[in-house]
Image: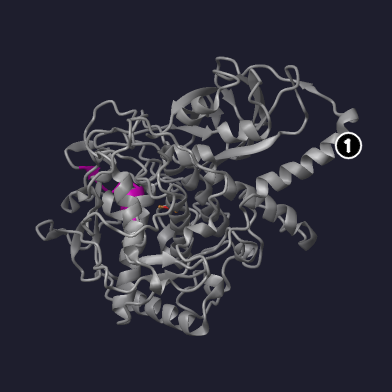
Amino acid sequence: MPFPLLATTPISSPLSPKNPLHRQPTKSPNNTYSLRLPNTISCEQKQVNNDGSSHQGIDRRNVLLGLGGLYGAATTTMAGGKVANADGGPVQPPDLSMCILATDSQADDEPVNCCPPNYSMSDIIDFELPPSYEPVNQRKPAHKLSPREIKRYKAAIAKMKQLNPKDPWNFMQQATIHCTFCNGAFFQVNYPDKLLQVHGNWLFLPWHRYYLYFWERILGKIIGDPTLAIPYWNWDTADGMFMPSVYLDDESSLYNDKRNHEHYKALMDFNYKNEPTPTPNPRPDEYRKVINRNYEMVEALFTKDQLAKASLFMGQPIVAGEEMSSKEMTENAGAIETLHNLAHEWVGPVAKPNHDMGNFYTAARDTLFFAHHANVDRMWDIYSKKRGYKVEFNDPDFLEASFLFYDENRQLVRCKVSDSLSAEQLGYTYAPEVCPWEGIGRRIRKEKTAKKQEAKKQLQLVEVSEFGTQPRPLDDPIRALVRRPKKNRSKLEMEEEIEVLVVDNIQFEPGTNIRFDVYISKPIEGLATPDYGEYAGRFSRIPHIHNKKFHHTGKARLQIGITELVENINAESSKGLVVTLVPRMGYPSIGGVFIELQEVDY
Ligand code: C2O
């Protein structure tokens, strides 16, 4: 049974509006779920009302129904791919009284204090979703705010900045929350040597969703306007690929001077390298090329593979007590986190330690952080809707993982991941915007094929060999012929297992920015065409946790689903693929490249 793509049918079963876990599970006819996504679930479809009108008329329960039907037996199905050495259960919130000095990896492990002002743990309540009679607030693109909305937002932030510095609502206090969860200010409860970290794993999206959620509500409270919605940086559209101008007014509360001033008027290039000499902005006649390339990268977030296996998009599972920061730590960010790093690098200044946006320790001191993350959150929203709200990981270790935040009543609340899975349930939504990146890959491929046909005769094929068994430095592009575990798979096989390209044992200096892009192409009788082929995905990492006590070398693994891409380049009958790793930033080394089959989520 294909799962419902959008639930628009009337509600008949009694659903608890609060916690999707308490809803009746909908049984699938058998235990095998396969992801049968037609190619055509468009991003615009994510808007329940497709006419571009406001969301006031939405029955939020429609969205809930989607969730409820997909929850299944949360307690019996475990997501695969867990690499935990011990199943420590869901990650628990930290003990606030045990806050330690965090570290700034780019400043020689300079200890930094981001401990919250109030250490009392006695006064924590469980988070409750906002009542459904509350209006749904609509987050809009920052470059499309009305003058009234701009004024309101600036006023709210100005007030937040003026609060008592010890007030948990104070702008800097809010900013340091990010530091505590990214730079190692807390050990995990019961694991005195394992630091808490919400980046590089499946907690990335839920944690940041809550962070913004409370920030938004606190701002609303501060100005006494509960309808306040934070704007988002709509960097996935051509008009939005610039720093939104409201953030550049140096007289306003949204301004932050610790940015790369070269980029104030520049088109954001997703291939940007932060080098001492700023990348010259493309000439306007080259804008199209850059924009399309950016679009391609956004579109690559939503391949069938990524939709079929949430860990590829969200990040890999992590459980309590698992190494989040140690010699053995492996970072396993999902595609969205990886792509999101770019805006941090783009906004942050070139000079190390790249404060503010370019370094996780200080990132949230820039108001643009929240606009950026609102769009990241919107990408998750699009992702969820494209999956028909099928829960990303039907696993208590995910759903029951929890965090602590100060809410809009200055109350500490414990928030579970399971309550974060739908924006609408949290009382906000995203203004319907077109997604110009949809279908871009197909269009570009068409053009390329036409060109290739012309140039075919002059095409010089080059030899490629296998990666080998030794780690290799990635200074220049590495090209390798990688064997596929199986060719000519049937449609059914493809629905049950996706083909995943793994770049393994990526090692790097933890205090550095690392980025490389991955392309694949179809070999021609064991030889490769000189061009890299199709963009498949990216590895990227921003300096964050680095505590010499714990680890000296950063280690990560990159996984990219390539089933759809292989189909698109008609390589299903090939024994292997040509994989090209193109370094963009930093000097990582690569342990190995291989392709494996992985079961889809259900
Ligand atoms: Cu917590 Cu953009 O990172």
Q: Position of residue 256 (x, y in %)?
A: 49, 69
Q: Position of residue 285 (x, y in %)?
A: 80, 60
Q: Position of residue 212 (x, y in %)?
A: 36, 62
Would you place residue 386 above or below residue 248 in this image? above
In the image, taking residue 358 as reference, residue 191 lies left or right, namely left
Quadrant of the snapshot with the C terminus:
top left
Would you place residue 507 above or below residue 392 in this image? above
In the image, taking residue 199 as reference, residue 267 lies left or right, namely right
Would you place residue 346 above or below residue 462 in this image? below
Q: Position of residue 414 (x, y in %)?
A: 20, 55
Quadrant of the snapshot with the N terminus:
top left
Residue 507 among those drawn in magenta: no
Residue extent of the magenta highlight: 178-188
The number of numbered discs placed on residues in the rendered structure image is 1
Instruction: Identify the residue at image location x=72%, y=46%.
Output: 444
Residue 564 in view in this figure: yes
Instruction: Identify the residue at image location x=55%, y=14%.
Output: 469
**Label 1: which residue?**
454
Between 461 and 362, the one nearer to me in the picture: 461
Task: Report crowding for label 1: few under 14, some 14 to 19, many 20 or more residues within 10 A (C-alpha).
Answer: few
| Colour style of the rendered protein structure | one colour
Toward which corner of the image does residue 2 lie, by quadrant? top left
Instruction: Identify the residue at image location x=23%, y=33%.
Output: 76
The residue most toward the top is 469
Assign a secondary structure to mark 1.
Answer: helix
Between 157 and 226, the one nearer to me in the picture: 226
